Image (cartoon, rainbow, N blue to C red):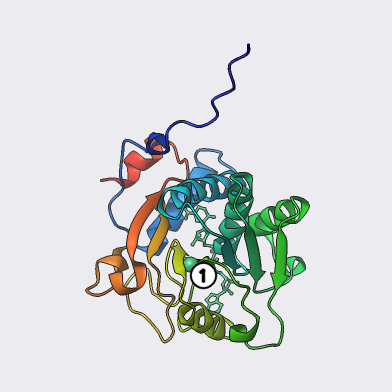
Amino acid sequence: MVEEANFCPSKEAIMKPILQLPPMTCQRVREIDRMAMDQFQMPGIVLMENAGRGAAECMDQIAPEGSVLILCGKGNNGGDGFAIARHLQLAGREVTILAMAPTDELQGDALIQANITKAAGIEIQVLGEAPAKECLPIADIIVDGLLGTGAKPPLRGRYVDVVEAANASSVRRIALDIPTGMSGDTGETGEPTFQADHTLTFAAPKIGFAKRDADRFTGEVHVISIGAPLALLRQFSV
Ligand SMILES: NC(=O)C1=CN([C@@H]2O[C@H](COP(=O)(O)OP(=O)(O)OC[C@H]3O[C@@H](n4cnc5c(N)ncnc54)[C@H](O)[C@@H]3O)[C@@H](O)[C@H]2O)[C@H](O)CC1
Ligand SMILES: [K+]
């Protein structure tokens, strides 16, 4: 009798880099992105896929039950959200996406991930005219893939009422990279700022997380590898 393929190591066996990077500014973390692409020939979509899969595996440990609503912004923070949705669906989770813009307004890696997500049959709702409080899909967990290292505070447009609606719902909240509304460099928070129970931050912690009371918005911080080579991590760990 053929042994059933054992796909998954035990949950604790998720592989972690042997080198943990120190807290950095958003700009410096974006340099890691850039060097991974330019010096190590890693296409941006590979970094995003690694980020998405790593974040989904972390969610499988910290929030293993319940339906998930992923809020996707127009940039690559949203792109991560689209990738996470696919990996959560693969793990049998009920996933819905609320996108801040229609797919045809996306570009680059975020557009690629959104198109894969659509092809995978995952529901993507686009924010309409109604106030977010009235149209936020019901879920047990809300994931903030609205703004990351490309944010220029203060929040503009509909991001304000979407973050307010997310904070008003009594569900678990998980931020991707940086809680939307917070500066990753200073830890300063605007009104509103996504109030997360956990923040899954990519490549390295952001220096703003060390600000006093920043944990009111980050919750517990988990660093997610984007698969950058050890030689690159070594250049940024000094
Ligand atoms: N660095 C890494 O290792 C990786 C990072 N990834 C993810 O990419 C985002 C950064 O993506 P980027 O497209 O540069 O920026 P954002 O998605 O944060 O936002 C850009 C988007 O938002 C608009 N915007 C900016 N400020 C505001 C504001 N105050 N109000 C409203 N809208 C705003 C702006 O116009 C753009 O449209 C990083 O955080 C990671 O999540 C990679 O995916 C993986 C590797
Ligand atoms: K975010």
In the orientation shown, which residue stands out farthest toward the left? 212
Residue 52, x across and y down, in percent: 54, 50
Q: Name the foreground residue: 162 vs 94.
A: 94
Observer-nearest residue: 21 or 52?
Answer: 52
- Is residue 205 something that shows in the picture? no
On the rendered structure, is 185 left or right of 151?
left
Of the residues shown, which amino acid type is indicated by label 1?
Leu
User: Is residue 216 depicted above or below 176 in this figure?
Assistant: below
Q: From this viewpoint, is residue 91 visible? A: yes
Q: Position of residue 172 (x, y in %)?
A: 44, 67
Q: Is residue 17 above or below residue 205?
A: above
> With 238 as the anchor, is 120 left or right in this view?
right
Q: Is mark 1 within 8 Å of ligand 1?
A: yes
Quadrant holding the N terminus: top right
Q: Secondary structure at mark 1?
A: loop
Residue in the image at 25% along x and 46% along y: 238
In the displayed orientation, state which residue is furthest to the front. Answer: 1
Against 79, residue 233 (above or below) is above
Residue that carries the numbered disc 1 in the rendered image: 147
Q: Residue at x 44, y 75 (%)?
A: 194
